[in-house]
Amino acid sequence: MLTFLCRLLYCDEIEKGEAMRVTGVREFRSKAPKFIKSRDLVFITRHGKLASILIPLGAPQDLPVDLKRELLERFGEVISGHLGRRGVSERKVIRDFEVWRAKRRMRRGRR
């Protein structure tokens, strides 16, 4: 779906040789604000291999529901994997969030 979206959104521009950049992680890190403000699709490489893709969103609310669902599922899988490797359970995350929220409410004067 993500590959399809890239083709769908950027096919004309890519064929013209516009709206697509390839950059290394180091260059991306030093010029991140410029890349984020740009309308270019950015392929970020690490040691010559694709590491990430930055897709500019003109109107995020206009993304297709299927794409939003797929992104949410993939993010969930990645986050779950990271937490699992560190031995953090869902229960621990919820407990930490509740503690954070209670502290935040106390600072705001709510109880």
Image: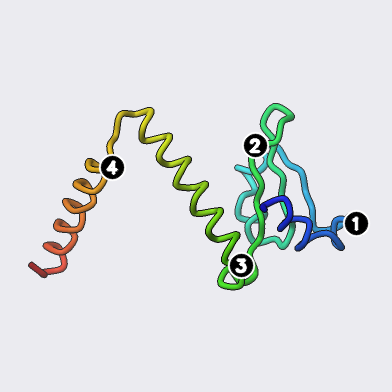
Q: Residue furthest right?
A: 16
Residue drawn at (61%, 67%) of the image: 63
Residue drawn at (74%, 58%) of the image: 40
Quadrant of residue 90 within the rendered picture: top left
Q: Secondary structure at mark 3?
A: loop
Q: Position of residue 24 (x, y in %)?
A: 70, 37
Residue drawn at (47%, 40%) of the image: 78
Q: Are marks 3 and 2 in contact (CB under 8 Å)?
A: no
What residue did someone put label 2 on?
A: 51
Amino acid found under the numbered disc labelled 4: Glu
What residue did someone put label 3 on?
A: 63
Instruction: Sort mark 4 into few (<14), some (14-19) or many (20+) by Cα contacts within 10 Å.
Output: few
Quarter of the image with the C terminus in it: bottom left
Q: Indicate which disc, 1 or 4, sits on the residue closer to the N terminus.
A: 1
Q: Nearer the viewer, mark 1 or mark 3?
A: 3
The Cα atoms of the two marked residues, 3 and 2, are separated by 23 Å
What residue did someone put label 1 on?
A: 15
- In the drawing, does residue 19 fall left or right of residue 55? right
Amino acid found under the numbered disc labelled 1: Glu
What residue did someone put label 4 on?
A: 90
Instruction: Sort mark 3 into few (<14), some (14-19) or many (20+) by Cα contacts within 10 Å.
Output: few
- Front residue of 103 and 83: 83
Q: Are marks 4 and 2 in contact (CB under 8 Å)?
A: no
Q: Position of residue 80 (x, y in %)?
A: 40, 39
The Cα atoms of the two marked residues, 1 and 4, are separated by 45 Å
